Amino acid sequence: MDTENTMNQNPLTAYVELEIRKENTTAKQWVALWAERALDAWHHEPETLAYEAMISVEDNSRILIFERYANGITSIQAHMARPSHKALESAMGESRMTRRVVRNVVASDIPSYGWWSRPDRPRQTDGRTIGGALVAVFGARFGDTTKREAFVELSGQHGKYCWDAEPDTLTYSGGLTTPEGSRAEEVEPGDLVFLMEATNEAAMTKHAQDPAHIALGPVMAERGVKMEMTFQGYYKTTGTGFMCR
């Protein structure tokens, strides 16, 4: 992988998970302050393809900010240069609303793998995506690139099935973590990060229990695909930002 080219030109996805200070704020209050920054990104950052806050289902002190940038580090730099970004950092710092960054993972999109948006998904009146969806995120590491490529091939083929058979599966895609930009003990360069978004828990369960999905297991085993789950979590989108343009 050409790291410099990846960071500067290819679409990048970032997952920034934070723990709030519950003695100073609630998840709802934290997201309400952050929402002003998200609205600015929607109106003034065409290269910011996604910028949404979601709250952990397991722990409401955890908030995951999901971000996608069309032109890699160039788009990220433009995002961080906005006055609204500096204003948010200042406001959060003064209010001591964030306890720590739990995980900061940057991944380069896998070309032609799954999809990041559906053209017919529900939208708010201003065009932003509607909140309340359930999101699953996991990180995975493989013994070698051959096994990783086999997983990408097989799960990518399954994604084509899901696109047609599961209209309530809103997002199904992933990327490979980059040598730069990721700060988390359990993450190494070349790990796979996968995100799936479904309209609700029933849709997520339907996906998991679909016979075509279950049938993937034996096929993966036959191809020798073994993976180590490095992290995983479930989150609810808030609709204060946007999952896609």
Image (spheres, rainbow, N blue to C red):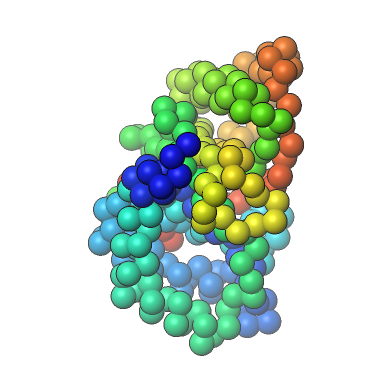
Q: Is residue 172 above or below residue 21?
A: above
Count of picture labels: 0
Q: Residue at x 25, y 61 (%)?
A: 44
x and y percent of residue 56 in the render?
64, 56
Q: Residue at x 55, y 69 (%)?
A: 28
Q: Is residue 120 above or below residue 96?
A: above
Q: Residue at x 38, y 79 (%)?
A: 87
Residue 31 seen in this snapshot? yes
Between 177 and 31, which is closer to the camera in this rendering?
177
Residue 214 seen in this snapshot? no
Quarter assignment of residue 9: top left
Quarter assignment of residue 140: top right
Quarter assignment of residue 38: bottom left
Q: Residue at x 38, y 72 (%)?
A: 85
Between 226 and 40, which is closer to the camera in this rendering?
226
x and y percent of residue 103 in the render?
62, 59
x and y percent of residue 185 in the render?
70, 56
Between 149 and 136, which is closer to the camera in this rendering?
149
Q: Is residue 138 left or right of residue 47?
A: right
Q: Is residue 193 above or below residue 130?
A: above
x and y percent of residue 105 in the render?
56, 53
